Amino acid sequence: MTSMLLRALPLTSLVLGVPLVAGCPTTPMDTTDAGPRPDAPGASTDDAGPSSGPTYTGEVRPILAEHCTGCHVTGGIAPFALDSYALAQAFGGRIVEVTEQRIMPPFLADNSGECNTYRDARWLSDDELATLARWYEIGMPEGDPSIEPPTPMLPPSLSPSEITTTLDVGAEWMPSATEVDSFRCFVVDMSAVGDQFVTGYEVVPGDARVVHHVILYEPSNEAAAATVMGLEGEDAALGYDCRGGIGASTYPVALWAPGSGAQHFPAGTGVRVGSWPAVIQVHYNTLTAGAHPDRTRIHLSSVASGVTPALITPIADPANLRLPPRMASVSQTIEQRVPANIRVYGIFPHMHQRGIGARAELIRSGASDAQCLTELPRWDFNWQLGYYYSSPFDVARGDTVRVTCDFNTMEESEMITWGEGTGDEMCIVYFYVTAS
Ligand code: HEC
C-alpha cells in the first residue's frame, strides 16, 4: 500500500534529500534586557485591592505552569526560569509583550480559528492573554501564598511500554569546536527494527547543550540507501559530514527541536521504516556551551501492521527560488496539482533565516477561491515545528495546493537562491498525508 502511494505521489521525488533544518542562529539570545519594562508599575497594588484582579498564585501561576515552565525551569531549555513569584515579577513586562505578540509559547501557526486549528497547540486563549496583561497592569500582586502550586506541564515522553526500539548512533561523537554549526549524519542499522510503521517517537539528545535539531530520514529507495551507506563508509570516522544535505533521496520521519518532547503520529497512521538503514542527522551548535561529546538516541514506537501508511511529502520548487536583494518583503509562490486522493493530517514548513512568514492554501478543482490551510504570520528559524490539524481533511486528485513563503532580503546585496548554507534560502512545506 505504501508503494502504491509512493507511485501515486510523484511530488515526493521533487526535493527529497534536502535536510529540513539547515542551520541555527549563531548569536545567543540577549536576555539582559529581559527584565521588567522601565514603565513597570508596582505601587498600584494597594489601590487595586486583592479581589479586584488576577494574582500570581490565583490566576497567573496556573497559566505559566500550563504553558511556560515546562521549558522555563532551572536546567530547562529556556534561558531563564519562570517558576517563582520573584522571577515572574522580574520578567512581568516581557511576559506580557511576548505573549501578546505570540512569540511565546513558541508556536508559529495561527491557531485562532481564522485558518484552521491544531492538535496540542501551544496557544494562549484571549482570556489568558488578558489575565496576564491585567495582572501586570495592577502591579503584579502575589495573592494567597498558601495556594498549592500546580504541577508544570512537561514535554511529553513515551512510556517504556510504548518503546519498541531505540535507535543509537553507536558511539559518542565530538562536534567540531572550531565550526559553531556542524551537521553530522549517522547511518543506523534498521535490521533489528524490521519492516515497521512508526507511530510515535522521542528524541533523546545525548548532550542537550550542543544538540540543536535532530531529523530521522528514511531512504526513498534501495539506491538511496546504498548511497548513504557509501557516504558513511568513505572514512573510518563515525557518520559523515552533511552540511550540504543528506546526499540521497530521503524523507523525514521524525523531527525534533528543543522542547518538542515525544510525538505521536495521528491515530491510526504510521510512517514506514526498516526496509533500509536510516539516517539520523544531528545539527550541533557549540556557541554557548563549547564542544561536548554527544550520543543522541531516538526511541521509536512502531507496529508491524494495522495502521494506514502515511507519507511525509514536500512541496518545493528549488530551481525557481530567486529572491532579489534589498526587499522588505519578497515571496515565492508554488502551486502543485495534487496527483491522488489524499487525507492531510499535518504540515511542516521550512525556511532559513530570511523567512518572515508563510501560508498554505487549497484551491478545489473548478473553484476560483483559495481556502486557507495554514497561516504562519511570523517565522522563527529557531522553532522548526510540525503542526497537526485538529481535524484532518481530504484533498481530491486535481485540487491545487498553493504554498507561499515570505522573505526579507534587506540585508542582502546579491540575489538569494536555493541551497543548504546560511547564505542560501529554502521554501519547503512537507505535508503528512495518507491515501483516502
Ligand atoms: C518549548 C519551550 C518554551 C516554552 C513552552 C516557552 N518558552 Fe519562552 N523561551 C524559550 C526559549 C528557548 C527562549 C529563548 C529564545 C528562543 O529560543 O526563542 C525563550 C524566551 C523567552 C523570553 C525572552 C524573549 C525576549 O525576547 O525577551 C520570554 C519573556 C519568554 N520566553 C516567556 C515565555 C512565557 C511567558 C511562556 C509561556 C506563556 C513561554 N516563554 C513558553 C522556550 C520556551
Image (spheres, helix red, strand yellow):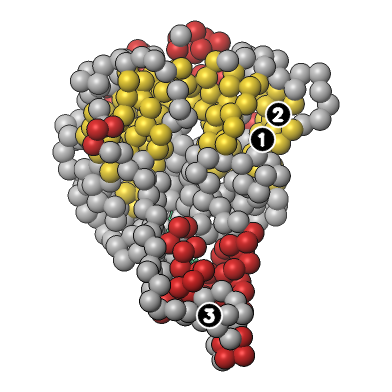
Give the residue pinned by disc 2: 362
Give the residue pinned by disc 1: 373
- When asked about the image quadrant of residue 400, the answer is top right
Image point 41% across, 23% down: which residue? Answer: 271
Q: Along the polypeptide, which appears first: circle 3 or circle 1? A: 3
User: Is 385 above or below relative to 246?
Assistant: below
Comparing marks 3 and 1, which lies closer to the viewer? Answer: 3
Q: Along the polypeptide, which appears first: circle 1 or circle 2? A: 2
Give the camera-side residue of 140 and 232.
Answer: 140
Three-letter residue code for mark 3 = Met
Q: Position of residue 149 (x, y in %)?
A: 38, 67
User: Is 434 above or below relative to 317?
Assistant: above
- Label disc, if present, on residue 394 of the rendered structure: none
Q: Position of residue 275 (x, y in %)?
A: 31, 15
Image point 16% across, 32% down: which residue? Answer: 236
Label 3: state its secondary structure.
Answer: loop
Binning the other alpha carbons within 10 Å of mark 1 as few (below 14), some (14 to 19) or many (20 upward) gives: many
- Label disc, if present, on residue 140 of the rendered structure: 3
Three-letter residue code for mark 1 = Leu
Three-letter residue code for mark 2 = Leu
Q: Could you tell me if the residues under marks 1 and 2 are in contact, i.e. CB atoms within 8 Å?
A: yes
